[in-house]
Image: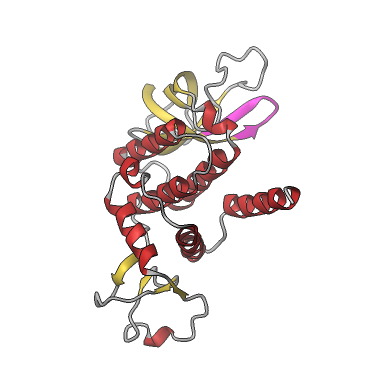
Amino acid sequence: MLTRTEGIVLKTQKYGEADLIVTYLSSDKGIIKAFAKSPRKTKSRFGSSLEPLTHARISLWGKEQAALPKITQADILNSFHRIREDFQDFVNISRLVEILLSVMPDGAPNKRLFAFFLNVLHTIKASERGSKDALHLITRIRLLAAIGCAPRLQSCGRCGEKSLDFYPSSGTILCNKCAAPLTQERSTLRISNNTVRFYTHTIEWPIHISNRLKPRREVLAELSDLLDKHLTYLLSKKLNSSEFLVGANRTRAGASR
């Protein structure tokens, strides 16, 4: 049975000497895996259509519920090669991909998530070169919101009272009364009102609007640290891409001295 869909390449895995298993975020099937025959050969018909983040129209052959259908054709709609060529952009998008693959089950259709992720790629592709720390942070927050895993920072997640103490184990701000049973939790974070305001705008406004905000560096650092702790607790592990980016930035900072 031949089926067609649109997909964004999230990752590829070598299989045998010349084959690949490709993981897509598809427009109508959610996250799917498919088999590509001999794409690593020099004269492969697939060309660059299986490169990470490539948005393509794909044809799949296999039974309706096949776990690993065969890719018979992949026509590039957007290559997003500029993102792959920019170190910071690619590593930060890789972080979004890692979150997706850690949280979302295979084969769960989500057209809104596909449209959101495609919009993120177009937004980053169109962004000016230079520091994009705010944009990368905004896309991370919006992805967590899109998959229902965003932390709650506007008020206490249990009673609605105002507070600035974030508890990673609860994924929310908690007031003193509601946090009483958790007083021994060491990873509690006290955040600023500026951080809460920036986060609220990021959640409520479209990406292209919130990207115009110019938050202070301490706000970005505070919110990035909070998200890292939130995700570490949520996933029970640290993101490989986050660890890699921290290490790479330290290396670059040391080399520039």
Front position in the image: 111 or 171: 171
Residue 198 in percent (x, y) is at 35, 58
Residue 49 in percent (x, y) is at 52, 22
Left or right position of 133 against 5: right
- Quadrant of the image occupied by residue 250: bottom right
Q: Is residue 219 above or below residue 99?
A: below
Residue 223 in percent (x, y) is at 45, 61
> Residue 109, can we see it?
no
Tell whether position 16 is magenta. Answer: yes
Image quarter (top left, top right, bottom left or bottom right) of the N terminus: top left
User: Could you tell me which residue is drawn at 39 percent across and 72 percent down?
Assistant: 170
Tell whether position 123 is magenta. Answer: no
Front position in the image: 216 or 79: 216
Q: Which residues are magenta?
A: 13-22
Q: Is residue 107 above or below residue 175?
A: above
What count of labels does the image hold?
Answer: 0
Residue 149 in percent (x, y) is at 37, 58
User: Could you tell me which residue is drawn at 55 percent across and 25 percent down?
Assistant: 36
Front position in the image: 79 or 67: 79
Q: Is residue 191 above or below residue 107?
A: below
Left or right position of 74 against 205: right
